[in-house]
Image (tube, rainbow, N blue to C red):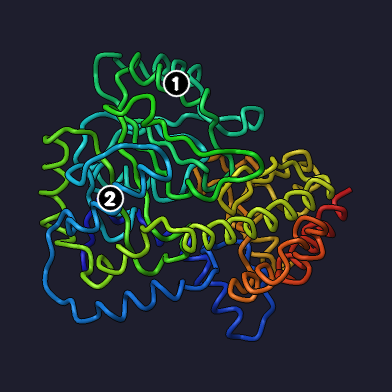
Amino acid sequence: MFDVSINVAWMKRSATLAINEKVNALKEKGETVYHLGFGESPFPVHPRFQKALCENADKKSYLPTQGILSLRKQIASFFEIMFHLSCTPEQIIVTPGSKMALFDTLMALDGSLMLPSPAWVSYQHQARLVQKETHYLYTSFEDRYLVTPTLIEETVEKYILRKKEQKILLLNYPSNPTGQTYSKSQLQALADAVYEHNLVVLSDEIYALITYNGNTHHSIAEFCPDRTIIFSGLSKDRSLGGFRLGLAILPKNETIINSILAFGSETWSCTAAPIQYMAIEAYKTDDELLQFIRDCTKIHETVTNYVAHRLLKAGIRCHEPQGAFYLFPDWNSYREELAKKGVKTSEDLAFHLLNNWNVATLPGSEFGRSTKDLTLRIATVDYDGSFALKKYQENKDLVEKDPEQFVNGIAPKVVNACNQLEEFTSGLL
């Protein structure tokens, strides 16, 4: 017997990782599962990244906790070119994944957390681990699940939060789980609220380059640079999730930078040496690499648009995606019909679809929604990324002329999942 600390006894494995393991176990048994539950960008490792990793496989020494200077210089150049954000290498911390950067920052900062609902699964659990008082910002479908200045004001008043005390606002855009993002004017309005209510913004912008349907990414750091910490990494737009390289860009504030580095020095020590040297190549901005990112993003856009349109056609409420590779549909209008099948919560709905329709999703309750809110998080990446990229680059005109034909050709599992969801929903009428 082992006695487990009360601080972690409540925890279970991350829902996103757990569903992936469950689906893989079902597949090993020979069962067909349409996997809309796990959001991993499926595209291949670019040959230049593979070459850089091989060339630096001999790098075995401990590196600075902050990350090697040559990489931090390259990252600073990348953000200047791609997002017109100026920062120095001294403001950048390289971490083994952005999740670690977020966790250590939550540990380092004082103040209660204002967390949007819905939000990525790990945010709420990390906050609880560091014993951070958390107040949810319950966003609405009508506002596209985006935080508004009014919602911040109402939450401050509801919880009697003193305006002079520091508070933390955690944003993620384009969003996992909703696929929505903020316009420049919306971010400007939020920045005004940041100063009014003494907020520090943790801005998770890891999907920044996967923005589409006429939307352009802007960082809230454009409008409140002294109050914003940006988080990013290589896992999404360059499909390098398993490489575990993330980063934080902090304001010019030695106190918070040194605090996070002190914590990092006692936990992760440093990000793996071969990965850091490889990442210098991954953060270059030449035409070849940027075209690779644009091609992958176009495929994300085409497939995610296809799924959204199929859901809407089936009578399932859903927003048109603006970025990332997620959708957040809901079946609330079918509440009575679903109750007759014993489906009364989003978790019931997810299990029902997996057990009866072979479609894996995640319940909205895992993302901070009420259990009675019949929402699901859908990831749209259940296809062979290497094959999809090859077919797209062979005939880019097809995506513009006939996107449905393209999706049918490269993502049959996604198409079949949509068929299952449509049949399931039509059977409720």
Q: Is residue 141 visible?
A: yes
- Residue at which label 1 appears: 152
Residue 416 left/right relative to 282 = right
Name the residue located 54 percent from the left edge and 79 percent from the top edge: 25
Given contact means CB atoms under 8 Å apart, are the residues at marks 2 and 1 in contact?
A: no
Residue 339 left/right relative to 322 = right
Residues packed near mark 1 inside 10 Å, few (<14), some (14 to 19) or many (20 plus): many
Q: Tell me the kind of residue under disc 1.
A: Ile
| x and y percentages locating residue 151 in the rendered image | 50, 21
Residue 32 left/right relative to 206 = right
Residue farthest to the front?
287
Q: Is residue 57 above or below residue 360?
A: below
Image depth: mark 2 or mark 1 in front: 2
* Residue 101: assigned label: 2
Name the residue located 28 percent from the left edge and 50 percent from the top edge: 101
Name the residue located 11 percent from the left edge and 56 percent from the top edge: 265
Q: CA distance from mark 2 to mark 1?
A: 25 Å
Judge by depth and name the residue closer to the eye, 82 or 6: 82
Q: Is residue 330 above or below residue 280?
A: above
Q: Is residue 390 above or below residue 284?
A: below
Judge by depth and name the residue closer to the eye, 296 or 156: 296
* Residue 325: assigned label: none
Residue 219 left/right relative to 145 = left
| x and y percentages locating residue 318 in the rendered image | 71, 42
**How many tags in the picture?**
2
| x and y percentages locating residue 7 in the rendered image | 25, 50
Please identify the quadrant where the N terminus is shown: bottom left
Q: Is residue 15 visible?
A: no
Q: Tell me the kind of residue under disc 2.
A: Ala
Q: Is residue 401 above or below residue 226?
A: below
| x and y percentages locating residue 113 in the rendered image | 33, 32
Element assignment for label 1 = helix
